[in-house]
Amino acid sequence: MSRTLNLEMDPFGLQAFTELAERHGGSASSVARMAAHYYLADSSGERPAWRVPAFARGAEPKRRRTDVRVELDDATWSALFQEARRQGVGICALATHAVLYFISDVDTGRVAERMDDSLAERRDP
């Protein structure tokens, strides 16, 4: 079973998300799931950008925002829901933040670096 979420993206975020989805087969939902798992796995990293920022917690005007509908499996939805409750934000706000966090790390090369580190750990017992 899957659950549907609407990610609220500004034009810049939407373009970055769309381009990333196109590079990975065109599925917004698969990129959103990957982003959620990446974000949640980074919870102990203590990066200042990890938590949903205060300005994204309040009700922002909807101008210049587009909803992107994605589907998440129950386990991913549940993990995001629990983290959203812990941070005191809505699940859609957290999922959107997770996607933008992931896109940022893809663009800066941090995702590739983490993958290299992970592969090196598996080779070196």
Image (cartoon, helix red, strand yellow):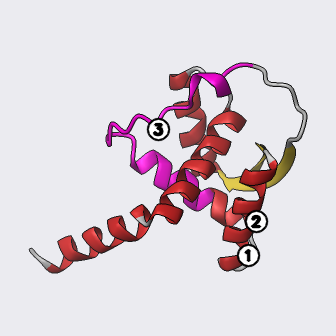
Report which quarter residue 58 is drawn in: top right
Q: State yes or no: residue 12 in magenta.
A: no
The answer to whether residue 48 is magenta is yes
Instruction: Describe residue 55's horizontal placement relative to residue 122 as left or right.
Output: right
Q: Is residue 59 above or below residue 45?
A: above
Q: Residues within 10 Å of mark 1 (few under 14, many from 20)?
A: few
Question: Where residue 22 is drawn, which disc sits there?
Answer: 1
What's under tag 3, amino acid-wise? Ala
Q: Nearer the viewer, mark 1 or mark 3?
A: 3
Q: Amino acid at mark 2?
A: Thr
Left or right relative to 62: residue 110: left
Mark 2, residue position: 18
Image location (x, y in percent) of residue 37: 50, 54
Q: Is residue 53 visible?
A: yes
Q: Quadrant of residue 70?
A: bottom right
Q: Residue at x 61, y 49 (%)?
A: 100
Three-letter amino acid code at the position of disc 1? Glu
Which contiguous range is marked in magenta?
33-58
Q: Is residue 29 above or below residue 53?
A: below
Image x and y of residue 16, in percent: 70, 61
Dot label at residue 49 = 3
Q: Quadrant of the N terminus?
A: bottom right
Does the residue at mark 2 contact the one at mark 1 (Cβ under 8 Å)?
Answer: yes
Q: Looking at the image, is mark 1 or mark 3 earlier in the sequence? A: 1
